[in-house]
């Protein structure tokens, strides 16, 4: 399939070789003409180096300079920004007598290219225009204005930063002072509680409690002693106690009707009667001195007990209040610490920004240096005629073949025997194409003549790319001469 | 009879080969063209007369390959066509009236007719009468380099008799009826009863004679279609890269039928033929 296709094309070209050559030459000629008629554009470019000062390396970390990376990142946009282009146009008087700034700016933006070589901190700004002079001036003005704008904006930034920091320091100083005042006031107010040690207080309470228990025990002992002292001195009472004891013992062994139990019961009744009857009578008096002594001791103990329990109560209350007071103080102290930290940081930054500002002011930070200012371009950068012409030669060959194929496609005549065979009629003979020798010679001569002329013409055409290759400006000069004439003709036509 | 004829022809050919070329060129062609005076009606009924050597036609058209270059591949193809045609027409009834036509002008009808006729006439078995039925643009006399004279149109319009119009070419057993004088109504003439009668007469006069009609193209004119109904067979010439496929189809539709003998594919330049041609060349080289 592939090979037959190839064969088909070869046959096609062989059959129409004159036509193929002529068409190819026609296409080439047209392309060559176009390459000369395309508007010429001159490109100027300027190289700018972003220089980092030695000082900026030395003071690295101390100063904070505006980020160069950011600057480079937005370089393309910054350079093609409307405001900058407007300034350039104004300074070059490009917009004089022209309406529609927008269109002009868009046109300029299209023709500006910025290439950034980040590794070397180099960037190349190019601009192409039909007038080489404008091209050069535009690039130079653009770069100059951009650098000016950039430097002043960096300076402004540094100034602004320092000013802002100073303001903030003032602000934070006030806040810090206030916080400190609050802490002091609190301490003054709750200083007693805050300074108490909780553990010691708790121990103290425990000791006091213990003491209280001891006192209570002693008091009860004394009170018991007094009772006992009183009873042991009465014989009736003693007898009653003995009888009752006896009755208890008897009841363990005998019922209530046992005679001895009854006897003891009777005795107990009797003793009780006696005790009743004796009521009015003075009991056996105790030793009054001893009783008074005990009484005095008991009352003293009572007083001591009361004192102690009050003390405990008080300490307990204090213990409960300590955590609250301490928390309040901590809160105030944290607040003060925060303010202080911020203030310190701001203060340090302020120092850095002061140095940065001084660096910007004295132009000691990164600077733009124009390594290579734009010069007047001699040769147009576009159109690239050699490429166009070479493409034209190739395109002529391909295009011509294409036209032949197209023509063959549109030719609906019988081209193959298979068509006739497909009709279903027997093919009785296939007569080959006959060529008259005389005519063939004539035809061949004609072909040779055409080929010779075509070859000469092709060589003539080759002169143009060679001229371009050798950078001979004859054609450009000729075109420059012709331009006014053609413009005049154009004007006359309209 | 035929043997005598053959002998005479052989003698004539020998003489022809021996005769100086200038003499033949100088007088022969023009003489023959004006030969056959209208009075000799009786003589035609018999066998075709022997042509005197100085009156043998010497056409020089390079495409008359069967006369000038019999070893060429084209001549071989025409010989092939001849043998196929003989096979096709040789049946119970000798179908000897054959017409050559095509869809559009310029496809090589006349040359095919001439070469086929020459090829047939060079053989031993058949005599051939070639009729130029293309009244609109007659060309056979030009190829054979004789002048126009009384011919088919004159017979049909009653101005001449058949015997008066037959021209002996001296090329084998080939005779010719030219188209004749210019007429305005070829279609009417062709569709007339007279035409049918003429064809019948030509067919039936000699049983071994082929009558080959060279006709106008099918698509622009109607004559060929009329004639196709009268003759025994139709040869349809198709030239490569001339008529469009649709034209060929249309013309084919108009002659399709039992009468259509087949197609002669003309001016082929297919790559597949190269080897065969080389073979022919080999033979040609040996022949010379």
Image: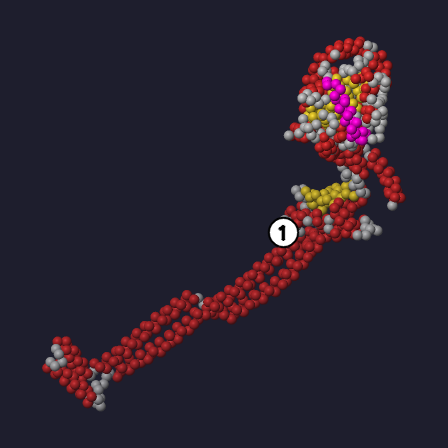
Q: Mainly helix, strand or loop, the magenta region?
A: helix
Crowd tier of the residue under label 1, counting other residues whose Cα lies within 10 Å: few below 14, some 14–19, many 20 or above: some
Residue B4 position by quadrant = top right
For the C terminus of chain A, the image quarter is top right
* Residue visible at 88% across and 44% down in the picture: A493
Q: Is residue B137 visible to us here?
A: no
Residue B11 located within the stretch drawn in magenta: no
- Asked if residue B179 lies left or right of residue A243, the reply is right
* Helix, strand or loop for disc 1: loop
Residue lying at the far front of the rendered structure: B42
Q: Position of residue B279 (x, y in %)?
A: 68, 17
Q: Is residue A276 above or below residue A343?
A: below
Residue lying at the far left of the rendered structure: A259
Q: Which residues are magenta?
A: B186-208
A265 or A295, nearer to the observer? A265
B61 or A106, nearer to the observer? B61
Q: Position of residue B170 (x, y in %)?
A: 79, 15
Q: Position of residue B14 (x, y in %)?
A: 78, 9
Residue A422 position by quadrant = top right
Q: Position of residue A176 (x, y in %)?
A: 58, 64
- Asked if residue A254 lies left or right of residue A96, the reply is left
Residue indicated by mark 1? A62
Q: Is residue A215 above or below residue A15?
A: below
Q: Is residue A388 visible to us here?
A: yes
Q: How many marks?
A: 1
Residue B205 located within the stretch drawn in magenta: yes
């Amino acid at each position: 399939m592939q090979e037959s296709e190839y064969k088909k094309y070869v046959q096609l070209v062989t059959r129409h070789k004159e036509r193929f050559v002529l068409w190819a030459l026609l296409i080439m000629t047209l392309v060559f003409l176009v390459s000369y008629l395309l508007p010429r554009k001159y490109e100027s470019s300027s190289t700018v180096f972003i220089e980092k000062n030695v000082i900026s390396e030395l003071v690295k970390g101390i100063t904070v300079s505006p980020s160069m990376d950011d600057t480079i990142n937005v370089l393309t946009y910054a350079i093609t920004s409307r405001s900058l282009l407007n300034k350039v146009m104004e300074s070059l008087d490009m917009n004089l007598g022209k309406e529609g700034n927008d269109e002009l700016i868009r046109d300029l933006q299209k023709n500006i290219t910025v290439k950034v070589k980040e590794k070397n901190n180099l960037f190349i700004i190019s601009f192409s225009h039909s007038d080489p002079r404008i091209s050069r001036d535009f690039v130079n003005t653009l770069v100059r204005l951009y650098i000016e704008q950039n430097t002043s904006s960096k300076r402004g930034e540094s100034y602004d930063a320092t000013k802002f920091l100073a303001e903030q320091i003032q602000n934070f100083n006030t806040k810090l002072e206030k916080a400190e005042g609050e802490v002091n006031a609190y301490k003054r107010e709750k200083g007693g509680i805050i300074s108490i040690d909780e553990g010691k207080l708790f121990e103290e309470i425990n000791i006091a409690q213990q003491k209280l228990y001891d006192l209570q025990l002693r008091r009860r002992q004394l009170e018991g002693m007094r009772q006992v002292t009183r009873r042991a001195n009465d014989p009736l009472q003693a007898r009653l106690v003995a009888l009752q004891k006896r009755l208890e013992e008897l009841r363990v062994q005998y019922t209530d009707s046992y005679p001895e139990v009854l006897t003891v019961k009777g005795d107990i009744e009797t003793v009780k009667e006696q005790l009743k009857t004796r009521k009015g009578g003075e009991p056996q008096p105790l030793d009054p001195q001893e009783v008074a002594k005990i009484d005095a001791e008991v009352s003293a103990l009572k007083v001591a007990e009361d004192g102690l329990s009050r003390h405990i109560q008080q300490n307990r209350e204090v213990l409960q209040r300590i955590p609250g007071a301490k928390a309040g103080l901590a809160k105030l102290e944290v607040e003060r610490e925060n303010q202080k930290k911020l203030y310190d940081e701001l203060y340090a930054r302020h120092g850095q920004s002061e140095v940065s500002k001084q660096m910007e002011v004295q132009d000691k930070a990164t600077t733009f240096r124009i390594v290579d200012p734009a010069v007047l371009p001699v040769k147009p950068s576009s159109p690239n005629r050699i490429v166009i012409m070479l493409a034209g030669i190739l395109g002529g060959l391909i295009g011509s073949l294409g036209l032949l194929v197209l023509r063959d496609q549109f030719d609906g005549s019988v081209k193959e025997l298979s068509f006739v065979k497909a009709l279903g009629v027997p093919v009785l003979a296939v007569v080959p194409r006959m060529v008259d020798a005389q005519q063939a010679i004539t035809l061949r001569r004609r072909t040779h003549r055409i080929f010779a002329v075509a070859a000469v013409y092709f060589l003539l055409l080759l002169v143009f790319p060679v001229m371009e290759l050798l950078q001979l400006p004859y054609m450009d000069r000729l075109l420059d001469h012709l331009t006014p004439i053609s413009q005049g003709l154009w004007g006359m036509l309209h | 009879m035929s043997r005598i004829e053959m002998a005479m022809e052989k003698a004539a050919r020998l003489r022809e080969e021996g005769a100086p070329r200038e003499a033949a060129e100088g007088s022969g062609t023009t003489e023959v063209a004006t030969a056959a005076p209208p009075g000799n009606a009786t003589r035609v009924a018999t066998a075709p007369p022997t042509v005197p050597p100085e009156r043998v036609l010497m056409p020089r058209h390079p495409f008359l390959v069967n006369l000038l270059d019999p070893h060429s591949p084209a001549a071989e193809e025409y010989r092939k066509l001849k043998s196929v045609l003989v096979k096709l027409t040789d049946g119970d009834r000798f179908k000897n009236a054959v017409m050559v036509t095509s869809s559009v002008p310029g496809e090589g009808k006349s040359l095919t007719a001439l070469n086929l006729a020459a090829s047939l006439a060079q053989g031993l078995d058949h005599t051939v009468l070639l009729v130029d039925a293309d009244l609109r643009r007659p060309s056979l006399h030009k190829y054979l380099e004789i002048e126009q004279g009384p011919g088919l149109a004159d017979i049909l319009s009653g101005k001449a008799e058949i015997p008066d119009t037959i021209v002996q070419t001296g090329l084998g057993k080939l005779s010719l009826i030219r188209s004749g004088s210019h007429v305005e109504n070829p279609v009417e003439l062709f569709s007339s009863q007279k035409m049918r009668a003429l064809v019948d007469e030509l067919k039936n006069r000699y049983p071994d004679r082929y009558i080959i009609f060279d006709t106008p193209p099918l698509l622009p004119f109607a004559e060929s279609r009329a004639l196709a109904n009268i003759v025994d067979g139709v040869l349809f010439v198709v030239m490569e890269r001339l008529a469009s496929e649709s034209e060929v189809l249309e013309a084919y539709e108009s002659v399709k039928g039992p009468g259509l003998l087949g197609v002669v594919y003309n001016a082929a330049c297919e790559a597949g033929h190269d080897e065969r041609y080389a073979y022919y060349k080999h033979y040609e080289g040996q022949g010379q």
